């Protein structure tokens, strides 16, 4: 019975993903990329590797827009230069576009550990600004780690945990 329930849940997620191909929010660290060093925080902008399982799923989903979200409190603490991080996230977003074929890839990051994702940590929340610009909330998916779920739910966006997304190998 448990196996049948898991299959039904996966099918429900798959159907939702198929219907919600317009806009995907996805977090950067431990979702799109991980550290090469295995540490929680990178040693520098070079300390990352691409999470190909996630990239392959994004390629299969082929959304209209991907928004890469990231909190970067180490910038404020002086461990990473903001200009270096900006170069890294631009490289990743361009690479993701080239790999997936998705032309509209947006990036937002905060230099605090809070989800205030205006440009450079100032201004409006990215999710709020996009929801106000377009009435597509039902066409949005948020892909992240379990600790991102509350934020997505607060915004009324369907949340899919990164490991659950990867299990959808039959996309």
Image (cartoon, rainbow, N blue to C red):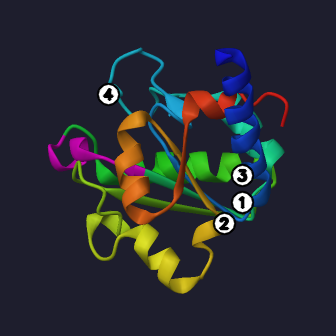
- Along the viewing direction, whichever of 114 and 11 lies nearer the viewer: 11
Q: Are marks 2 and 4 in contact (CB under 8 Å)?
A: no
Residue sitting farthest toward the left: 77
The x, y position of residue 122, in whole percent, is 26, 71
Label 3: state its secondary structure.
Answer: helix
For label 1, the residue is: 20
Residue 77 falls inside the magenta stretch: yes
For label 2, the residue is: 139
Residue 124 to residue 138: above or below: below
For the N terminus, which image quadrant? top right
Residue 155 falls inside the magenta stretch: no
Can residue 50 be seen at all in this image of the molecule?
Answer: no
Distance of label 2 from label 4 (alpha carbons)? 32 Å
Distance of label 1 from label 3 (alpha carbons)? 6 Å
Of the numbered discs 2 and 4, the one sitting upstream in the chain is 4
Residue 57 to residue 130: above or below: above
Q: Residue at x 67, y 25 (%)?
A: 6
Q: Nearer the viewer, mark 4 or mark 1?
A: 1
Q: Are marks 4 and 1 in contact (CB under 8 Å)?
A: no
Q: Nearer the viewer, mark 1 or mark 3?
A: 3
Q: Residue at x 46, y 63 (%)?
A: 156
Q: Residue at x 68, y 46 (%)?
A: 95
Distance of label 4 from label 1 (alpha carbons)? 32 Å
Of the numbered discs 1 and 2, the one sitting upstream in the chain is 1
Label 1: state its secondary structure.
Answer: loop
Label 4: state its secondary structure.
Answer: loop
Q: Are marks 1 and 3 in contact (CB under 8 Å)?
A: yes
For label 4, the residue is: 41
Distance of label 4 from label 3 (alpha carbons)? 33 Å
The tag on residue 16 is: 3
């Amino acid at each position: 019975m448990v196996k049948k329930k898991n299959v039904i849940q996966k099918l429900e997620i798959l159907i939702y993903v198929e219907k919600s191909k317009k806009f995907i929010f996805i977090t950067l660290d431990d979702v799109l990329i991980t550290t090469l060093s295995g540490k929680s925080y990178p040693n520098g902008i070079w300390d990352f590797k691409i999470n190909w399982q996630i990239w392959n799923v994004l390629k299969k989903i082929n959304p209209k827009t991907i928004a890469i979200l990231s909190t970067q409190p180490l910038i404020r603490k002086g461990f990473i230069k903001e200009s270096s991080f900006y170069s890294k996230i631009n490289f990743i977003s361009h690479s993701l576009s080239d790999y997936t074929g998705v032309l509209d890839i947006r990036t937002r990051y905060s230099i605090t550990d809070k989800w205030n994702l205006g440009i450079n940590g100032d201004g409006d929340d990215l999710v709020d600004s996009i929801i106000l610009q377009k009435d597509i909330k039902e066409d949005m998916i948020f892909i992240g780690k379990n600790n991102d779920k509350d934020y997505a739910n607060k915004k009324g966006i369907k949340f899919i945990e990164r490991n659950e997304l990867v299990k959808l190998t039959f996309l």
